[in-house]
């Protein structure tokens, strides 16, 4: 008699089973957080009645999306919360700080040429104290290091030409982190792709995916940047190239949230956007790609499924890919949130919750005692390295080290 | 309201006994009490058990009647403005739209706007393109739109507020007591015989007013008076959330299912209109044919209704009177019958017909008549004095999320709720009902079960229809009433009632919810 329910982000499908609450790490750590069921579908009905029903406690949501993974009714719980924050959240008490943390590429542009200085200065006590007081960035935080030579600069100088020697190509969305903080990851990506027989193209124009902008409420800017990426990815796809990434959050943002949260068209590239590990696994499975690994490679690793990785549901591709490397001894950690959630854990007021959420994971890591933790998420890397002292690698870097 | 003070005192002599605690009876009790009459209001169930709790919740601007019933339209706009003032807490100023679809043409619109203006209704023709942009859910085929000051009104809240004020001005309210017959002295009605769980009792009053809705006809027969009533049944559908923030009507000759009203967190679509025999007035089940008709017409207003979750269906019976000019009926809508004049039965008056919107006016007319009979000179003040809960705007404090919904529902009465300790605990998540609000309602309104409780605080009226909260609510109610053994019964009875409304719309998400409920509570051994 009626067609299927099409309510916004499917909130009406909620059956009040509370499974989402069971898995929410913030609800477990923080009594002030109402939990995904209330914050999402329940309060949404009242927010529609009157924006006054926006609950300030929604600011605690980590955006980890574990609730969404758990929901048996297909309610996009975390997207609902994210959308509500964009629509109704009151102005931040730390606008400058939020802008600084949200604009990962802008800050990156500024910091890169001064990387040695920034890296020297940031960890120093007095500077941190200033950040703590003036910006509300927690003094306990270790900052991601900024690199002196951006990846894109290196690529243009040392790698671009050689890529034209390949018959087939992939397009690479490197993200801010690989460009500014850790170009080695992007270099590793190029190495692995070349080893697989593919040349690497960069996108015509790349902007930060905007995941941090959305989380911090800068919707307009996020939308502007998204449009640039959508156009560039569309162009790459129309040339017949897949768009590959190395960061799970960028991928989730561009693959799902451009459409679901920002309401932008994603058909032009969505199905061709993939994490490098998933793409590689599929190519190897189908026999199109063969990777040769070093015989002498030995490494004890623990794999951490980043929240957004779990939301994508692609962790098994990476895990299987890592298992193909002879000499890798792999422990797959239980799925637990590290607590940092992008820029959330950098904010002074949330630092304690962030650490509390992550404590289970840190304990697991220490118990498994690996040489390195492997994960696709760069913010997890900062959090885990800071909290456990154990180095964290992107799986692509592991592959790069293992290939001949 | 169950508060001991409101219970009738033995042997108290009343000036007026009002039979029927719908909106008309409650408004009449308030008016009488404000004018100093010794007043008793008697209701066989809880307040709002009749048409007053089973309508559309539309505070008419009068526009719907502007063409067919100018007198009714004028009454509506006047009352609309009064209620916005005295019952601000029960009314949401949503505004209303009358949309024209291509098949409706625009001739009706021109005449309609003219007639609205003649009745004093500020109707304004809008640019349909602008309406389409600003209200994207509205049928994008519209060729015309007119704005009018329609609003959404909560009939439960409005009835409660009137009854509360009556009590505060000395009236007694007797609920769960059915008037079975009249006490007569010669030809004169001098009181009523009432059956309740305590047995049979008599109450005496100089005047008796029948405000028993469609049931007035049957009662009047017992006093030897015939009122020719036509029960007109209307069915409605409740959708899970607000699809639009305004009332949307169709700009054509009033017909089936052509109004959608935003009521609290839901949208209500209605209504049908069918003459039914008297013996079917108590059968409120909605038929598949009614659901189909409602949906078919409803999607013409707002197409996305075809994909919106339907929570339940319900129906009510309008008390229409078929006689027009006799007695003191002043309009086709409102019917005030002075049975002394009309039938030679002194001491008895009937007030019926009309609308939720015009109930205050009906009460004023009735009380004017009562006063003239009792020889009392007192001016009507109900249009000027704000109702309880609406006396002053509520202060909205951030960081007190838990009390927001309750304050929205009860206005300034919310200050009587105790949100400390477990008070802030959320019991009904869909409708954001806290323990504090529940305890307040149990105390203030004297409820017997969860069906009564929901009328006063919306518990269990949301998406899950009580699936989630019914157990916790039952526990609290049983505890407050001091009868823990009843908790189980409360749950069973409540779900039975909810299922009645869900059965006609059992598909999609509501079917899943019903299955979930059945699994949870269908087994006899579930834990309470
Ligand atoms: C489907 C529908 C939609 C409507 N929509 C609107 C709308 O949107 N806006 C609007 O303004 N109006 C609307 N109306 C009209 C409005 O609901 C009614 O006019 C109004 O509620 C009538 O109130 P009442 O108090 O006269 O009757 P009722 O509410 O029916 O009250 C009569 C009361 O008398 C009690 N009673 C009966 N017999 C006895 C007895 N023997 N002893 C004690 N008590 C007894 C009953 O239990 C009942 O509570 C609608 C009506 C219907 C049916
Ligand atoms: S996104 Fe994560 S933190 Fe936010 S509600 Fe869902 S599970 Fe909880
Ligand atoms: S898991 Fe899904 S269906 Fe269950 S309560 Fe949460 S949102 Fe609702
Ligand atoms: S996820 Fe990547 S591209 Fe997106 S903001 Fe973070 S670093 Fe930049």
Image: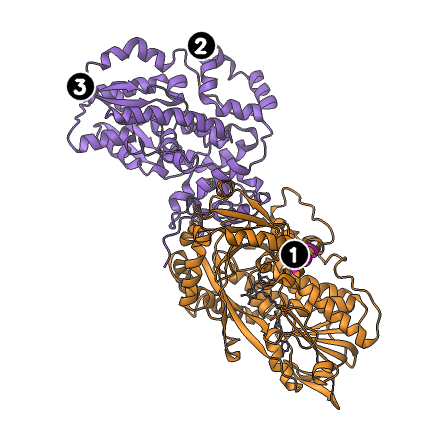
Chain colours: A purple, B orange
Where's the C terminus of chain A, which quadrant? top left
Q: Is residue B431 above or below residue B228?
A: above
Q: Which residue is mark 2?
A: A113
Badge 2: chain ID: A
Residue at left offset 73%, top offset 50%: B392
Q: Is residue B361 above or below residue A330?
A: below
Nearer to me, A358 or A3: A3
Nearer to me, B436 or B84: B84
Q: Which residue is mark 1?
A: B119
Q: Looking at the image, which residue sits at the far left?
A: A287
> Mark 1 packing: few (<14 Cα in 10 Å), some, or many (20+)?
many
Q: CA distance from mark 3 to mark 2?
A: 35 Å
For numbered disc 2, what is the local secondary structure?
helix
Q: Which residue is mark 3?
A: A167
Q: CA distance from mark 1 to mark 3?
A: 80 Å
Instruction: State whether residue B357 appears in this view.
Output: no
> Mark 3 packing: few (<14 Cα in 10 Å), some, or many (20+)?
few
**Labelled disc at residue B5:** none
Q: Nearer the viewer, mark 2 or mark 1?
A: 1
**Quarter location, residue A105:** top left
Q: In the image, residue A255 lies at what x, y percent?
A: 35, 33
Residue at left offset 61%, top offset 61%: B155
For numbered disc 1, what is the local secondary structure?
helix
Label 1 near ligand 1 (CB < 8 Å): no
The earlier-in-sequence mark between 3 and 2 is 2
């Amino acid at each position: 008699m009626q067609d299927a329910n099409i309510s916004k982000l499917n909130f009406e499908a909620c059956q009040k089973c509370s499974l989402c609450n069971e898995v929410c790490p913030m609800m477990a750590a923080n009594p002030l957080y109402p939990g995904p069921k209330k914050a999402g579908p329940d309060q949404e009905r009242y927010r529609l009645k009157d924006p006054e029903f926006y609950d300030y406690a929604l600011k605690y949501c980590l955006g980890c999306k574990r609730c969404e993974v758990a929901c048996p009714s297909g309610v996009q719980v975390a997207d609902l919360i994210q959308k509500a924050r964009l629509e109704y959240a009151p102005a931040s008490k730390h606008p400058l700080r939020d802008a600084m943390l949200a604009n990962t590429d802008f800050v990156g542009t500024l910091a890169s040429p001064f990387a040695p200085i920034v890296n020297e200065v940031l960890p120093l006590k007095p500077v941190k104290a200033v950040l703590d007081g003036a910006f509300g960035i927690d003094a306990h935080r270790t900052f991601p290091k900024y690199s002196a030579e951006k990846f894109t600069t290196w690529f243009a100088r040392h790698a671009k030409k050689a890529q034209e020697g390949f018959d087939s190509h992939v397009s690479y969305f490197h993200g801010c982190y690989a460009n500014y903080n850790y170009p080695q990851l992007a270099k590793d990506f190029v190495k692995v792709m070349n080893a697989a027989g593919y040349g690497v193209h960069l996108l015509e124009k790349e902007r930060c995916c905007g995941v941090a902008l959305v989380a911090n409420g800068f919707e307009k800017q996020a939308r502007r940047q998204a449009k640039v990426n959508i156009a560039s990815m569309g162009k790459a796809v129309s040339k017949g190239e897949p768009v590959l990434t190395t960061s799970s959050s960028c991928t989730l943002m561009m693959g799902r949230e451009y459409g679901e949260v920002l309401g932008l068209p994603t058909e032009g590239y969505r199905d061709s956007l993939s994490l490098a590990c998933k793409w590689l696994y599929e190519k190897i499975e189908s026999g199109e790609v063969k990777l040769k690994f070093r015989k002498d490679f030995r490494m004890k690793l623990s794999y951490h499924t980043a929240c957004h990785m779990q939301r994508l549901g692609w962790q098994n591709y990476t895990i299987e890919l890592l298992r193909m490397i002879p000499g890798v001894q792999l422990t797959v950690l239980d799925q637990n949130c590290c607590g940092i959630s992008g820029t959330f854990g950098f904010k002074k007021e949330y630092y304690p919750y962030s650490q509390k959420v992550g404590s289970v994971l840190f304990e697991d890591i220490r118990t498994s005692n690996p040489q390195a933790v492997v994960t696709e998420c760069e913010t997890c890397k900062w959090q885990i390295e800071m909290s456990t002292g154990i180095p964290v690698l992107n799986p692509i870097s592991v592959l790069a080290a293992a290939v001949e | 309201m169950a508060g001991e003070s409101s219970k009738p005192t033995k042997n108290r002599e009343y000036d007026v006994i009002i039979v029927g605690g719908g909106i008309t009876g409650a408004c009449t009790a308030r008016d009488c009490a404000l004018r100093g009459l010794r007043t008793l209001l008697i209701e066989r169930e809880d307040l709002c058990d009749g048409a007053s709790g089973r309508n559309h919740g539309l505070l008419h601007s009068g526009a719907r009647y502007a063409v067919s019933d100018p007198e009714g339209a004028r009454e509506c706009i006047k009352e609309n403005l009064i209620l916005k003032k005295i019952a601000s807490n029960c009314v949401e100023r949503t505004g209303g739209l009358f949309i024209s679809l291509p098949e409706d043409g625009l001739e009706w619109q021109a005449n309609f706007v003219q007639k609205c203006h003649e009745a004093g209704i500020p109707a304004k023709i809008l640019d349909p393109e602008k309406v389409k942009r600003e209200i994207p859910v509205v049928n994008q085929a519209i060729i015309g739109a007119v704005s009018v000051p329609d609003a959404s009104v909560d009939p439960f809240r409005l009835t409660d507020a009137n009854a509360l004020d009556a009590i505060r001005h000395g009236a007694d309210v007797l609920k769960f007591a059915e008037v079975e017959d009249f006490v007569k002295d010669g030809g004169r009605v001098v009181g009523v015989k009432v059956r309740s769980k305590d047995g049979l009792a008599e109450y005496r009053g100089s005047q008796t007013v029948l405000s028993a809705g469609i049931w007035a006809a049957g009662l009047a027969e017992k006093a030897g008076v015939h009122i020719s009533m036509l029960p007109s049944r209307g069915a409605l559908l409740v959708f899970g959330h607000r699809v639009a923030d305004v009332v949307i009507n169709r700009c054509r000759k009033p017909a089936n299912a052509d109004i959608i009203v935003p009521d609290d967190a839901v949208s209500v679509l209605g209504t049908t209109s069918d003459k039914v025999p008297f013996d079917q007035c108590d059968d409120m089940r909605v038929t598949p044919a009614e659901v189909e008709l409602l949906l078919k017409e409803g999607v013409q207003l707002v197409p996305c209704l075809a994909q919106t979750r339907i929570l339940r269906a319900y129906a009510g019976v309008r008390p229409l009177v078929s006689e027009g000019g006799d007695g003191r009926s002043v309009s086709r809508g409102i019917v005030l019958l002075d049975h002394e004049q009309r039938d030679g039965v002194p001491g008895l008056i009937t007030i019926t017909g009309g609308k939720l919107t015009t109930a205050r006016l009906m009460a004023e007319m009735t009380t004017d008549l009562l006063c003239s009979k009792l020889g009392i000179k007192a001016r009507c003040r109900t249009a000027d004095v704000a109702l309880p809960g609406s006396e002053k705007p509520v202060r909205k404090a951030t960081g007190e999320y838990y009390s927001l919904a309750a304050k929205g529902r009860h206005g300034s009465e919310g200050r009587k709720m105790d949100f400390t300790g477990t008070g802030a605990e959320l019991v009904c998540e869909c409708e954001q009902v806290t323990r504090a609000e529940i305890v307040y309602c149990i105390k203030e309104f004297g409820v017997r079960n969860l069906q009564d409780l929901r009328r006063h605080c919306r518990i269990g009226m949301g998406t899950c229809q009580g699936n989630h909260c019914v157990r916790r609510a039952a526990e609290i109610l049983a505890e407050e009433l001091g009868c823990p053994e009843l908790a189980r019964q409360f749950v069973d009875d409540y779900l039975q009632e909810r299922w009645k409304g869900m059965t006609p719309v059992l598909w999609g998400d509501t079917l899943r919810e019903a299955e979930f409920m059945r699994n949870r509570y269908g087994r006899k051994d579930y834990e309470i």
